[in-house]
Image (cartoon, coloured by chain):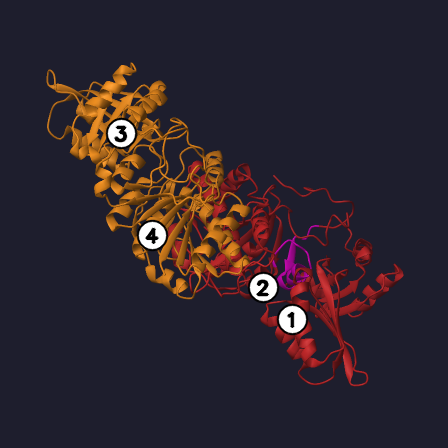
Chain colours: A red, B orange
Amino acid sequence: MALIVQKYGGTSVGDTERMKNVARRALAAQAKGHRVVVVVSAMSGETNRLLGLVKQITDRPDEREQDQIVATGEQVSIGLVALAIQAQGGKAQSFLGSQCRIVTDSTFSKARIKSIDADSIFRVLDEGRIAVIAGFQGIDEHGNVTTLGRGGSDTTAVAIAAAIKADACEIYTDVDGVYTTDPNVAPRARKLDRISYEEMLELASLGAKVLQIRSVEFAMKYRVPLWVKSSFSDDPGTLVCPEDQAMEDVVVSGIAYDKNDARLWVRGVPDKPGVAAKIFGALDEKAIVVDIIVQNPPHDGVCDLAFTVARADLTKATDVVGKVAKQLKARAVESDDRIAKISIVGVGMRNHSGVAAKMFRVLASEGINVQMISTSEIRVSCVIDPKYTELAVQALHTAFGLDGPAPVAAKKKSKK
Amino acid sequence: MALIVQKYGGTSVGDTERMKNVARRALAAQAKGHRVVVVVSAMSGETNRLLGLVKQITDRPDEREQDQIVATGEQVSIGLVALAIQAQGGKAQSFLGSQCRIVTDSTFSKARIKSIDADSIFRVLDEGRIAVIAGFQGIDEHGNVTTLGRGGSDTTAVAIAAAIKADACEIYTDVDGVYTTDPNVAPRARKLDRISYEEMLELASLGAKVLQIRSVEFAMKYRVPLWVKSSFSDDPGTLVCPEDQAMEDVVVSGIAYDKNDARLWVRGVPDKPGVAAKIFGALDEKAIVVDIIVQNPPHDGVCDLAFTVARADLTKATDVVGKVAKQLKARAVESDDRIAKISIVGVGMRNHSGVAAKMFRVLASEGINVQMISTSEIRVSCVIDPKYTELAVQALHTAFGLDGPAPVAAKKKSKK
């Protein structure tokens, strides 16, 4: 008998028929003797519908009120899924974030989970019921409703799995696992059976939309075995787990791309200690995540600083940086929202040299100019012109030996 | 400087443009120096949309889960109205039932308010902000979300007005006050400037849909001056207040009708003590409200018992009564969902005799048969065939001298 957390995304609960399917899956797991917690997102389209209403009122909504509004999407889902389980003869109880005390900080729209009341969940499980918990939402210590940001339901699921010490956390989505790259871009992309937390983290943070980055961080930190599965098939999916020997034999496990970033330049910054700290401190205060940072060697006592942020944060970031730049007497702040980031990821890189050089060579041979470079122990990322994205992904996928034998059909490996 | 609670119904917050109108009205009251609490319903149609989703899952929903789902309607409204106030330069904070601790019992879908945390509301008012509170919802002592039943937002508004000792509670709706009867049925219906709590209570409970009955009970109990106003005009509306001398000069203040009731008969009930207690006790346990009760004089040791319930409760009531009837060895249980109830209401009846007789005479002269009769100190009700409803209302309206000088236009008295 295992303790399992199943998380279903927006498309998996997109309508009431699909919710009945979710109920069947949850009950099937219970019938095998498992204790089951289900975490659900809002019905697909619902969060956008609610944000659309907000936009009709104001372009600059107070984030507390916006969270109050958008949290309702998950609230509707949990009630309906609990009813669907009951309608199939099962026992279930729904939980809002406030009802199992998913306490977060007060960073509205991007809140971080601080604690979860596992006892409230166990009380329901111990009565033989399925606990159906709202993803994406929590409450702060003042009782305000908070949300965790897009994709936050994954984080809720993993955080709950960690809090109740679940044996597995299954993330159900509309794809049947993690691929070497986006199959829409590279038709010969292959599904991975296993991937390490570290690699998944790099892939998730680099734009592979399968899992939310914080959920992977949480899973890695608490060693929660994470499965990525399709809610529409019985494919075993991909297991995200600690690194093992076999994984290190593969140099590159996957190729990620991201077209949702933008770049800011601060030109002519005085070359003094504490300058970068001022700029990035100010961005951090506004909870703006900075990705790649590049600083040119100083010339005539000034230097240029370039960095990338999510495109959605560009306006806010430009405001913040503009103010700091004025104080620092920098020459100018410029931005570019037409960039793409291509990354190769693999734990095997640790033991292989020349991986970055090979990447630059492949891109150069396709005539693609590299504008910014950033590396980690298991990743190399390049910023390029977005029009070359697909070409770059395909070329790298082939060059690093990731191509499958033939174009992959949607349910190629679907078993039983 | 006064302390005012304004309640806006579903049509008044039916879309974001109307919400901006609500924000303007609330800010206008604040600009006059008042402290303002706004209570809002779900956007019109929203509660039905949510119940439609529930119905797609099951015909017999668990009421805890259903409440969890439908409470989201008001949650969206409060966030949007708070944003609309902020967008107009005002300060506002929204409150869920749980956030100002509107604690109810655990009768899901028909919960009753037990207490409200006035301090949490004053903290926001004292900062110069408008408190925007979700109507219709509360939490029970276990933290479950509860709802108060249809029209429950009126009750929330009055309960809050009582808890914070407000100077007035203004109920904004799509009509500009309380009328002598439904203007759609009797074109010469007149708007009343004032009406007593007692009369309003009889009218509300008899199918005049302007105010929810429990809100009037609350207002009467705590002496909250209650205004019924239109959110689309500046008409002063109708004041519901304690009875005064002038009111008693009018014999009949209004005519109400109700086509939403159904009748149950229990035939051949043994004429023994405790029989009625058993039947109505069982109905009360299921929170089914019984209205008119008529018991025939016993004959051969048995009697017939007839009573009316809301038509929506008929199936449930038939179940309950069927079981009790079996235990009591009653002969049969029959039902009829085609009835109408016509009532005349007026505090002046206390000092005038022959009012009921006059009502029967008027109905008889129109050839309308009276099937059941029920009276209170200030009301006489008759159950009739529903096809005569409009005829009965018009005849009584004229006979009791309620007709206005000419057909009333929708905004006849709209001023300024």
Quarter location, residue B331: top left
Question: Alpha-carbon distance for marks 4 and 1?
Answer: 46 Å
Q: Nearer the viewer, mark 4 or mark 1?
A: 4
Q: Residues within 10 Å of mark 3 (few under 14, many from 20)?
A: many
Q: Residue furthest front?
A: B405
Q: Nearer the viewer, residue A7 or B352?
A: B352
Q: Badge 1 is on which residue?
A: A320
Q: Nearer the viewer, residue A7 or B398?
A: B398
- Label 3 marks a residue whose chain is B
Span shown in magenta: A191-212
**Quadrant position of the C terminus of chain A in the picture:** top right
Quarter location, residue A357: bottom right
The amino acid type found where label 4 is placed reads: Ala
Q: Residue furthest top?
A: B367
- Label 2 marks a residue whose chain is A
Q: Badge 4 is on which residue?
A: B168
> Does residue A175 show up magenta in the picture?
no
Residue B213 position, x and y percent, is 31, 40
Q: Are marks 2 and 1 on the same chain?
A: yes
Residue B344 badge: 3
Question: Alpha-carbon distance for marks 3 and 2?
Answer: 69 Å
- Label 4 marks a residue whose chain is B
Q: Residues within 10 Å of mark 2 (few under 14, many from 20)?
A: some
Query: Does residue A6 appear in this view?
Result: yes
Residue B212 position, x and y percent, is 34, 40
**What residue is drawn where x is 69% and y is 77%?**
A326
Question: Which of the two discs, 2 and 1, labels the residue nearer the N terminus?
Answer: 2
Residue A274 position, x and y percent, is 66, 83
Q: Secondary structure at mark 4?
A: strand
